[in-house]
Image: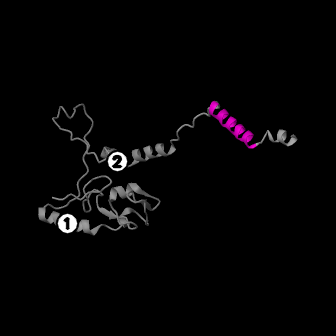
Amino acid sequence: MPRLECKICFHEYKNNRNKRTPRILTNCGHTVCERCAESLMKDGKIICPFDRETTTFTGGVQNLHKNFAIVSFLDEIQEEDGTPQIEQAEPIVADEDDSTDEENNVEQPEPERNAFGINDEDFEDFEMVRHYQRQMRAYRPPTPEPDPEIENNFVYQNIIRALANINIGRDIEDDN
């Protein structure tokens, strides 16, 4: 079965489920899931992470057009499978107690990783990525201290060039 996924978070698109509805960035035509669109949105604008085109809109990301080609394909797959697409319930957090997952024989799945090796938990809110982007933009390599020998060499070379341009022996020849 084909897998249609958001190329940012690599989660499979879902029609009206878990904010994974495919949304079209109208200025460039790229598609991202609703959750990634929310993370990318700033002041009613989304800068496409693929081609840096800016999509401007009013309201929330729900006002972006759905990618109906993907939505209809997902509906066809759902009809073939016979499994209804229903909203997944949020996991229920148990009260804190002294029991551990090992004692309860609960196996914890490995967290999914995207192509960049970032955990989904870290990647979903983009805060960690933005933090590192800010650090990289702010980094300036230290400027080296000027080397006095090189600086003096440059001065001496300029003096020699200036002296070469002056014909010192000309006065002597004129006297003869």
Give the percent coordinates (x, y) of residue 73.
21, 66
At x 20% / y 59%, what residue is drawn?
Answer: 86
Report the amino acid beneath label 2.
Phe
Q: Are marks 2 and 1 in contact (CB under 8 Å)?
A: no
- Front one among 149 and 156: 156
For residue 143, side relative to residue 1 (left or right): right
| Vertical comparison of 154 with 121: above or below | above
x%, y% of residue 145? 60, 33
Numbered label attached to residue 75: 1
Segment tinted magenta in the rendering? 149-165
Q: CA distance from mark 2 to mark 1?
A: 28 Å
Residue at left 40%, top 44%? Answer: 128
Question: Quick one: 23 or 50, which is closer to the camera?
Answer: 50
Q: Is residue 70 left or right of residue 57?
A: left
Lower sequence index among marks 2 and 1 = 1
For residue 140, above or below residue 29: above
* Picture quadrant of residue 15: bottom left
Q: Main secondary structure of the magenta part?
A: helix
Tell me how the rendering is colored.
Answer: one colour
Please name the residue that numbered disc 2 is placed on: 123
Residue 44 lies in the magenta-colored region: no
